[in-house]
Amino acid sequence: MAKILVTGGMGFIGSHTVVELVNAGYEPVIVDNLVNSHPKILEQLTRILGFKPAFYQLDLCDEHAVRSLSVAEPDIEGIIHFAAFKAVGESVQLPLKYYHNNFSSMLNLLEAYYGKPLNFVFSSSCTVYGQPDHLPVNENAPVKPAQSPYGNTKQIAEEILQDMIASGSNYKVVSLRYFNPVGAHDSALIGELPIGVPQNLVPFITQTAIGKREKITVFGDDYNTPDGSCIRDYIHVVDLAKAHVAALKLMEKPDYSGYDVFNIGTGNGTSVLEVIHAFERATNEKLNYQIGPRRGGDVEQVWGDVTKSTEKLHWKAELGIDEMMSSAWAWEKYLFENPL
Ligand code: UD1
């Protein structure tokens, strides 16, 4: 069984990817500093997997700790690097925190394993496209000036990885540009765990439906879209997790070398109001929502062209918006009955 290091493996996307790695016959080794995740997720993973996955609690910004990790785990064949800060608004307030954390962690990791023939998957984002000129946006679209330090860390990290490959490194690299990950594992034992007030749409919806929040505000209904609200490409986190397995499989092919990048979305755009109505339909819950002003920095509409991921990564999303909503809701209800 090939050992795969999963940094940020206790987080939302990371924990679901740990499950899919095991399903595909890999041996995940989780690294997480737990700043944005909960220690109990390890127990939840153990319940899903039937065994406790290897876990190191360490901060990837600590160079010595990362070097020790590479000594303790020398026979790693791949790294999936999720660990990063991801709150757009906070990154505008605290840019140095974002640049320091997101770059030091990735550089320490790359340097610690440098020279080994490793497959490296990087968590990038559709945020690199800004507001694209053409929709659906494909991987060749120009990268737009970043709207936030968070977005800039994704753009620069992609460049760092390409420079590393151009220098003749032994690594093989795939960057996955995620659209909007939502939903939860069908066991309802893991899911998104926002700290404090959720910034993202779907956790805000589920917390409103469960009664933790009074109402949800739709940030603007005067955009140039059919119903006036913003459009995104929502992708089920389990489909997204499987894309990481597909990326490893691609890099394992002897004819794969260097660097490549793939959109990971469904290829469909869904508006905020459509998401709200899909939630109500899929769960039979009535949502208390109001229309409010636009949120600063929001892109009007973006959804992905997934032709390249379908053809070259041999990956395609299978789950739709109803499954995204019903699974997110099942997880919120689980949390209500079983607070972590
Ligand atoms: C953005 C980035 C994404 C990044 C993510 C991290 C883009 C296109 N996407 O996602 O790459 O990983 O931040 O957090 O830049 N909304 C409401 N009410 C709410 C919350 C959200 O109406 O209470 C709306 C937003 O205005 C937006 C949509 O819901 O139109 C989705 O918002 P959100 O879930 O925050 O994700 P993005 O901003 O698209």
Image: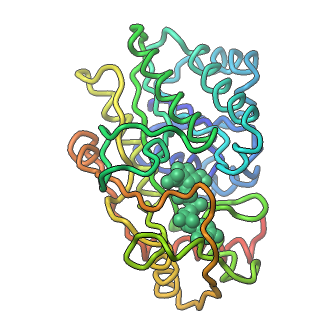
Residue shown at 47%/70% (left/top)?
223
Image-based side of 273 in relation to 317, left or right:
right
Query: Does residue 293 show up?
Result: yes
Query: Does residue 184 show up?
Result: no
* Residue nearer the viewer, 336 or 298: 298
Q: Quadrant of the C terminus?
A: bottom right
Q: Quadrant of residue 311?
A: top left
Does residue 99 lie above or below 282 as drawn? above
Q: Quadrant of the N terminus?
A: top left
Residue shown at 41%/49% (left/top)?
242
Does residue 158 lie above or below 243 as drawn? above
Q: Quadrant of residue 197?
A: bottom right
Image-based side of 108 in relation to 322, left or right:
right
Locate residue 193, reporting x and y percent. Answer: 69, 60
* Residue nearer the viewer, 27 or 201: 201
Locate residue 136, reporting x and y percent. Answer: 30, 55
Locate residue 100, reporting x and y percent. Answer: 72, 28
Residue shown at 60%/26% (left/top)?
106
Image-based side of 144 in relation to 70, left or right:
left
* Residue nearer the viewer, 194 or 139: 139
Image-based side of 284 in relation to 197, left or right:
left
Locate residue 168, reporting x and y percent. Answer: 39, 8
Does residue 238 lie above or below 330 as drawn? above
The colouring scheme, among rainbow, by chain, secondary structure or one colour, is rainbow
Total labels drawn: 0
State which image quarter holds ligand 1. Answer: bottom right
